Image (cartoon, rainbow, N blue to C red):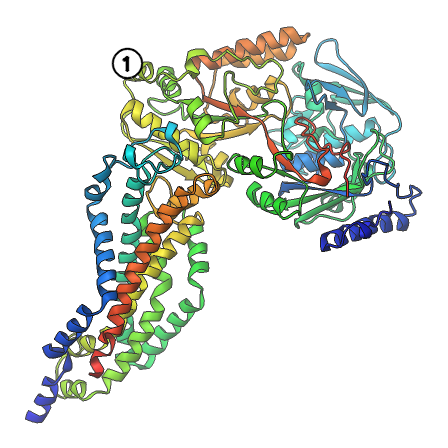
């Protein structure tokens, strides 16, 4: 089959696809690349075809400056880090690394595999990683993930909280040889290999720092896909397969990320045949199930959680019994059945099911609907004076179930409960700045499959999204112990103890967990969701 | 002197015979009756919703049982419209939803009319720089499309009450009626009874209130009655788009926007609020149309 599938169809879309394929071939020829356009194999797939993936606007395409699901997805496609995650178990496995070892969870020796190159031909070596991490920590760059490196020795000299920096690079990152790196952490962290799989730990080439501005719009990575044109905030991020990719075969010709303002918009465009993979809002799932029964894809395990953060600094909310009463007055299963199409599971632990060590029965009666017991607990603790409110984030659709919880609270405690809204861009500043003084309906995805992913940011006293203002030295201590513990069993045991503290204190109200749900087009139906490596599209074969 | 007095006396708004003719025309117009009955019904459920909401036995729109979420109409169980997403009685929700729509319609129409009458009167009667300034302002406002302007302003307000939405709608909808008022004031100003009042030395406010306004207000009032329906549907549109009223307010636009994902599986969530909205708008339009046809607006030319 030729790369120009004009004969197979006459629609304008086919024609446009042919043009795209032609453009890619043209680009390959122009760039003098020796790799000829590969003819498709017998199953009708086309290895030159471009996969179109629906996302929303990424915050930044620079690894150290990117945050959020969408930026992570694109960066993950453009860059490969030292590890990626096993799609089944979530365990980190070596990718660019040849080996990662530590005896004390504080000093990590990393060997890098030979043969990786950046899209501009530069080799990937130990220096590439040291360069990326030092650039991210450099306060002059002001990259958002800078403080992710704060546990590395020497970070405080590069980026002191006060005063002038006294060093250019972190002394804890030592390049021992061209392919060997030693990282020394201030405090041991057994979960460090998980962090190495995060996009901001990806390597960057020398060329990046020579021209940061053009790197920001057209990053040069070492991943399976390379940008074909700069992205300055438009509605498409175009990539093509990197012919010299060292991480294995790429079965398609590239990925075009289509930038939408919301999942619902992406779904509409999916229905029009303009995008191959779109994430579904839960409200759209029943319709998609009915219309495209063969094309709806779910992550195999729940990778999101919904919960209510609590303003524990307010009278009433500072009492664990009140918080427990609020939790027990919520009929989670009925909300799941009636409003979430049954596609969620009652949360039973303070992390996310994809995390290693999630327990199915930990929360017990605190998360079990029992309005009478809740009322008794509420009355005994003195209740909360005046009306209650739940705040929902605009555009998330959470107000539907927030209203259901409001109704259940109103009925259980005989109080007035209203639902308020906060604009999504003001959510965290509002919660952490104590302007939003109500329980807030929140959702959080799993970033990496360690309990620390949830426990650290959400509940440690210095956590970045500790919206319940939890401050328990015992809990912080357990997290540190777990970070220093050598074996996985020991780590999980300590994390379990830490989570038990959260359950006893009902720090935030657990609701339910659910799996990301997507629709995929016929032509890309070989795609399966990869919860941990969200930017991995290399296995997708496309039939045109 | 007596001539002038006679002329001044002939100020036509006093003619009760003509008023009777108007009333007769209205009473013989089926449009008026249909419109009036519908409007009266909606005003009733605005003022006293519990009277109508409770007739099937489930009069509290906040009494919900999630297990019944989105179930269809079941007249035997006392839920002739079915259940809402939250499992509340949809009939009661629709009845209670009238209040916000009708209130917005009434407040915006009254506010628009008051502003339009005042500004149009000043611009038309005094002329000169007053007219120039007011007319230019109205031209600026009229050049901003209502929906665009409302979207821009409402988007920047975080908590939007009935009053906030009404204010924004007033701010963008007064110029049309103001220009009508201005034009008819200019034409009345040149009429002999105004000249007579002037020569009698009546104070300006007296001339405006007793002679000009009664003879110019007709077209504006007709515009206003026609406007109520339009305002109600604009409010529903804005709310449906997510920038009007917010949950937990009971409003037809909100009920429609919340039900949007379920239209195919639970169509009653679409039909009943949309039907109520259509009926209310139609009622006000019919009423306004019959008033317009009766010749009320041209009373000063009679």
Q: Secondary structure at mark 1?
A: helix
Q: Position of residue A221 (x, y in %)?
A: 78, 37
Q: Nearer the viewer, residue A325 or A288?
A: A288
Residue linked to disc 1: A380
**A399 vs B23: above or below:** above
Question: Residue at 42% across / 39% down in the picture?
Answer: A421
Left or right: A83 in relation to A489: right
Q: Nearer the viewer, residue A245 or A271?
A: A271
Q: Position of residue A513 (x, y in %)?
A: 53, 24
* Residue sticking out furthest to the front: B76
The answer to whether residue A166 shows anywhere in this view is: no
The answer to whether residue A499 shows anywhere in this view is: yes
Question: Residue at 36% across / 25% down in the picture?
Answer: A314
Q: Nearer the viewer, residue A367 or B53?
A: B53
Left or right: B205 in relation to A204: left
Q: Position of residue A312 (x, y in %)?
A: 40, 23
């Amino acid at each position: 089959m030729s790369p120009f599938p004009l004969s197979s169809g006459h629609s304008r879309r086919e024609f446009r696809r042919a043009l795209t394929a032609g453009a890619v071939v043209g680009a390959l020829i122009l760039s003098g690349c020796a790799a000829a356009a590969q003819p498709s194999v017998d199953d009708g797939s086309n290895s030159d075809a471009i996969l179109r993936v629906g996302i929303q606007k990424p915050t930044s395409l620079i690894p150290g400056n990117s945050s959020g699901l969408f930026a992570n997805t694109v960066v993950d496609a453009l860059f490969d880090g030292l590890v990626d995650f096993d799609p089944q178990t979530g365990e980190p496995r070596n990718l660019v690394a040849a080996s990662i070892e530590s005896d004390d969870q504080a000093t990590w020796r990393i060997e890098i595999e030979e043969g990786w190159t950046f899209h501009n031909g530069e080799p990937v070596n130990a220096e590439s990683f040291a360069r990326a991490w030092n650039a991210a920590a450099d306060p002059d760059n002001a990259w958002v993930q800078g403080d992710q490196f704060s546990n590395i020795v020497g970070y405080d000299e590069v980026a002191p909280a006060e005063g002038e920096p006294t060093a250019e690079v972190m002394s804890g990152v030592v390049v021992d040889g061209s392919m060997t790196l030693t990282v020394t952490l201030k405090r041991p962290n057994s979960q460090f290999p998980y962090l190495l799989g995060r996009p901001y730990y990806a390597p960057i080439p020398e060329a990046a720092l020579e021209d940061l501005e053009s790197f920001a719009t057209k990053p040069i990575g070492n991943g399976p896909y390379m940008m074909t044109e700069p992205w300055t905030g438009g509605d498409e991020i175009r990539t093509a397969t990197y012919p010299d990719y060292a991480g294995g075969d790429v079965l398609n010709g590239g990925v075009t990320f289509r930038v939408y303002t919301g999942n619902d918009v992406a779904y509409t465009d999916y229905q029009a045949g303009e995008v191959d993979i779109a994430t579904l809002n839960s409200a759209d799932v029943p319709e998609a199930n009915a219309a495209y029964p063969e094309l709806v894809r779910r992550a195999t395990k729940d990778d999101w959680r919904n919960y209510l953060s609590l303003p524990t600094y307010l009278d009433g909310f500072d009492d664990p019994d009140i918080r427990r009463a609020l939790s027990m007055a919520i009929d989670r299963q009925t909300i799941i059945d009636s409003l979430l199409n049954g596609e969620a599971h009652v949360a039973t632990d303070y992390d996310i099911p994809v995390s290693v060590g999630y327990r199915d029965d930990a929360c017990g009666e605190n998360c079990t609907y029992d309005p009478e017991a809740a009322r008794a607990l509420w009355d005994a603790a003195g209740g909360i004076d005046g009306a209650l409110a739940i705040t929902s984030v605009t555009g998330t659709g959470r107000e539907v179930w927030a209203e259901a919880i409001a109704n259940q609270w109103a009925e259980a405690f005989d109080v007035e409960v209203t639902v308020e809204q906060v604009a999504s861009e003001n959510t965290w500043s509002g919660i952490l700045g104590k302007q939003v003084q109500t329980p807030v309906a929140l959702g959080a995805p799993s970033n990496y499959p360690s309990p620390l992913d949830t426990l650290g940011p959400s509940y440690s006293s210095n956590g970045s999204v500790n919206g319940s203002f939890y401050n328990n030295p015992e809990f912080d201590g357990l997290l540190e112990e777990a970070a220093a513990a050598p074996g996985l069993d020991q780590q999980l045991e300590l994390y379990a103890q830490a989570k038990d503290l959260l359950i006893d204190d009902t720090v935030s109200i657990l609701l339910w967990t659910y799996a990301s749900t997507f629709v995929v087009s016929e032509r890309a139906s070989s795609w399966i969701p990869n919860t941990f490596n969200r930017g991995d599209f290399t296995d997708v074969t496309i039939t045109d | 002197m007596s001539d002038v007095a006679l002329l001044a006396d002939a100020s036509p708004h006093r003619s009760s015979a003509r008023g009777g003719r108007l009333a007769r025309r209205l009473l013989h117009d089926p449009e008026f009756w249909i419109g009036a009955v519908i409007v009266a019904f909606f005003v009733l459920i605005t003022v006293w919703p519990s009277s109508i909401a409770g007739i099937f036995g489930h009069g509290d729109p906040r009494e919900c049982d999630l297990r019944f979420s989105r179930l269809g109409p079941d007249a035997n169980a006392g839920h002739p419209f079915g259940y809402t997403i939250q499992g509340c009685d949809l009939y009661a929700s629709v009845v209670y939803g009238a209040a916000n729509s009708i209130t917005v319609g009434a407040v915006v129409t009254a506010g628009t009319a008051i502003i339009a009458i005042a500004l149009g009167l000043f611009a038309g009667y005094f002329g000169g720089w007053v007219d120039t300034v007011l007319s230019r302002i109205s031209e600026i406002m009229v050049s901003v499309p209502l929906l665009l302007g409302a979207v821009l302003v409402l988007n920047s307000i975080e908590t939007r009450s009935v009053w906030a939405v009404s204010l924004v709608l007033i701010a963008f909808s007064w110029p049309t009626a103001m220009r009508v008022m201005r034009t008819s004031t200019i034409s009345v100003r040149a009429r002999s009874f105004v000249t007579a009042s002037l020569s009698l030395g009546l104070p300006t406010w007296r001339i405006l209130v007793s002679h000009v306004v009664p003879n110019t207000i007709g077209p504006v009032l007709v515009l206003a009655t026609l406007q109520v329906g339009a305002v109600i549907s604009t409010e529903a549109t804005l709310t449906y788009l997510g920038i009007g009223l917010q949950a937990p307010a009971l409003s037809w636009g909100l009920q429609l926007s919340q039900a949007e994902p379920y239209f195919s599986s639970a169509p009653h969530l679409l039909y009943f609020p949309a039907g109520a909205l259509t009926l209310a708008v139609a009622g006000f339009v019919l009423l306004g149309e019959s008033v317009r046809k009766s010749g009320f607006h041209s009373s000063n030319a009679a």
